[in-house]
Image (cartoon, rainbow, N blue to C red):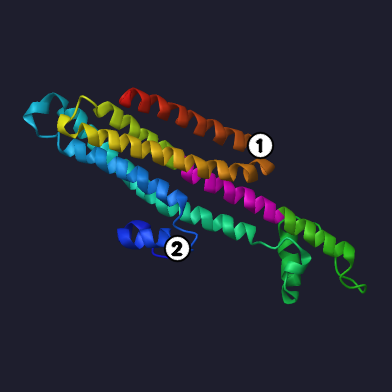
Amino acid sequence: MVNSFKKISIEEYLERLGSGSPTPGGGAAAALTSAQGAALIMMVANHTIGKPKYAEFEELNTFILEEAKELLVKLEAGMDRDAKAFGRVSDAYALPRLFSDIQIDRVSAEIDRLRAEGHTIDDINEDGMTEEIMDQIENALKADRQAEISAASEEAAEAPLALMEDSLSALRLAATMKGRSNRMLESDIYVAALSLAAGIRSANFNVEANLPAIEKADPEAASSIRLRSAGILAETDTIINGLLG
């Protein structure tokens, strides 16, 4: 994969999005949707700054432009962050969970690794690999795999959650611009706001998708993430209703 999705052409990005490759996927699409919203905010600000007609809003739009620039960088990075997080989740689910998943020549190394991580596994004696030892190994493998799935899922939930937070920050800027920027471009503010709202709602699906795995290991963390995303969704609806109502 390329170092960054933002460095490829739109044509190549869409081709990859529609392919059988796991990334880019919905998370990257959500990030790009929000990034377009932030870019539109910058466009409106740029077409307002320096216009004598909007001199009273010069300082506000200059501030908005700088804020939107910073948010755009974060939103663009969200495309790659999502792909990285997805890769870790995929790797976690691919970890061995049964004794039969371990290659014969890897058994000793796996036992050493599991012991180093605190699991109790008896020594192999003259009786060889007993059922009891195999059960110990399997229990350790399953525990390790579930812990990594949970940790990876939390990272995979934090990526779209950060996207939601950054998108909301940009959406607040869009709402501030109505009536305080170039009136010829008011429709672009609406498109920016709707793009950001779409990015937020789309990212939330990715947050929700990872919560069950987090909940198994850390119900409090899952609850905290759910509350944060719910608050963002509620404020998003309030802003959109106020802007377009």
Q: Which residues are magenta?
A: 144-161
Instruction: Locate residue 116, reporting x and y percent.
Output: 72, 60
- The residue sitting at 31% across, 26% down in the picture is 244
Indicate left or right for 80 with 121 as reference: left
Please say if the residues under marks 1 and 2 sit with CB atoms less than 8 Å apart. no
Q: How far separated are the C-alphas under marks 1 and 2?
A: 35 Å
Residue 195 part of the magenta segment:
no
- The residue sitting at 36% across, 38% down in the picture is 196
Identify the residue under disc 1: 219
Identify the residue under disc 2: 19
Q: Dividing the picture into quarters, in which one does residue 6 lie?
A: bottom left
Q: Amino acid at mark 2?
A: Ser
Instruction: Locate residue 17, reporting x and y percent.
Output: 42, 58
Label 1 element class = helix
* Quarter of the figure that contains the C terminus: top left
Q: Nearer the viewer, residue 234 or 173?
A: 234
Q: Nearer the viewer, residue 201 or 50?
A: 201
Indicate left or right for 183 with 12 as reference: left
From where the camera sits, is residue 132 visible?
Answer: yes
- In the rendered image, the vertical position of residue 202 relative to residue 84, given as above or below: above
Q: Dividing the picture into quarters, in which one does residue 125 lie?
A: bottom right
